[in-house]
Amino acid sequence: MFPQLSRGYDRAITVFSPDGRLLQVEYALAATKRATLAVGIKSKEGVALIAVKKHMSPLAEPPAKIHRIDKHIGAIAAGLVGDGLVLIDRSRVESQYNKLIYGEPITVKSLARKIALFKQQYTQYAGLRPFGVMMIFGGVDERPELYITHPGGAFYSYEAYAAGMNSDKVNDILREEYDPNSPLEKAMILALKAITKAQEEKLTPDLLEIAVITAEDREFRFLSKDEIKALLEKTPSEEEGTESEKSADEKEGSS
């Protein structure tokens, strides 16, 4: 009815559109969809963070996607690399503040909340813009925890979550097949299976970063290329899935 009213509301972060949207926040969310895939998944045994590396010049080393925040917490910054580095540094500072002030490690939920509030400040003041990053925090407190922070300043607890290109397809698979009682290795294989179906190219250890924090030792560590290779060998390929579906259909037809 009044098409001119929808124009210009994306020029400042402090201005709501007539239907109550902050368009700059939505643009920031769209920026996260351009990043390579990142997945966080937890089980009763711990948490795994999985990231697909970005293809760059053969002369360049791809930047790290997964970062150690504290002994028991890791994070993936899915989105603009520069924005992600700012939030990773902020996360580490918040973790150290907590130790100095309270004398104990920060919890995953508390860290996610602090980073979410920090991101929310960038939606209130003119001259700023939202961070174009979805932060995935995984760690172990009393039990395994996985939290996501939104560019608008919200944060949510998840059992499994994917961000980046083709993340909708990955999240659909995780929703259908995720089992909270599965061991950590099986959860990682499910995540890799979902990524394989969403990716256009075959996954290799050189294309992946994987870090785990187990409930047993509560220590962040990266998996070696040999460990990643072993997981990929256990991950069913799309062709194998198609063949098993065909055989199941043939059995139903014969019965």
Image (cartoon, grey):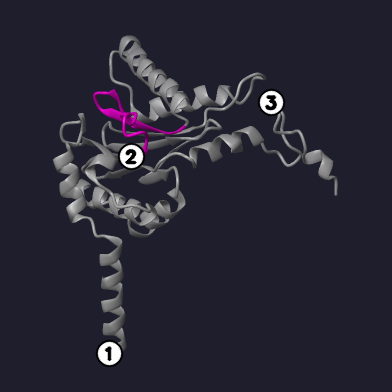
Q: Give the mark, 2 or 1, whose residue is nearer the N terminus.
A: 2
Q: Secondary structure at mark 1?
A: helix
In the image: residue 23, left or right of residue 173: right
- The percent coordinates of residue 12 (x first, y second) are 69, 26
Mark 1 or 3 closer to N-term? 3
Q: Which residue is mark 2?
A: 51
Q: Name the residue at 22% across, 43% down.
A: 205
Residue drawn at point x = 33 percent, y = 38 percent: 53
2 or 1: mark nearer the eye? 2
Task: State which tag comes first along the sequence, 3 or 2.
Answer: 3
Image spot of residue 158 (x, y percent): 39, 43
- Report, in whole angstroms, how far the alpha carbon at label 2 lies from the one at label 1: 42 Å
Q: Which residue is mark 1?
A: 254
- The amino acid pointed to by label 3 is Thr
The residue type indicated by label 2 comes to Ala
Pick whichever, 88 or 45, lies toward us.
88
Nearest to the eye among marks 3 and 2: give it. Answer: 2
Does residue 239 lie above or below 54 as drawn?
A: below
Contact (Cβ within 8 Å) of mark 2 with mark 1: no
**Magenta stretch: residue 75 in it?**
yes
Q: How far apart are the two marked residues, 1 and 3, measured between alpha carbons? A: 64 Å
Using the image as rendered, state which of residue 1 and residue 227 is in the foreground: 227
Determine the residue located farthest toward the bottom in the rendered image: 254
Q: Position of residue 8 (x, y in %)?
A: 76, 33
Which residue is denoted by mark 3 in the rendering? 14
* Image quarter of residue 77: top left
At x 21%, y 51%, the residue is 232
Q: Which residues are magenta?
A: 54-79
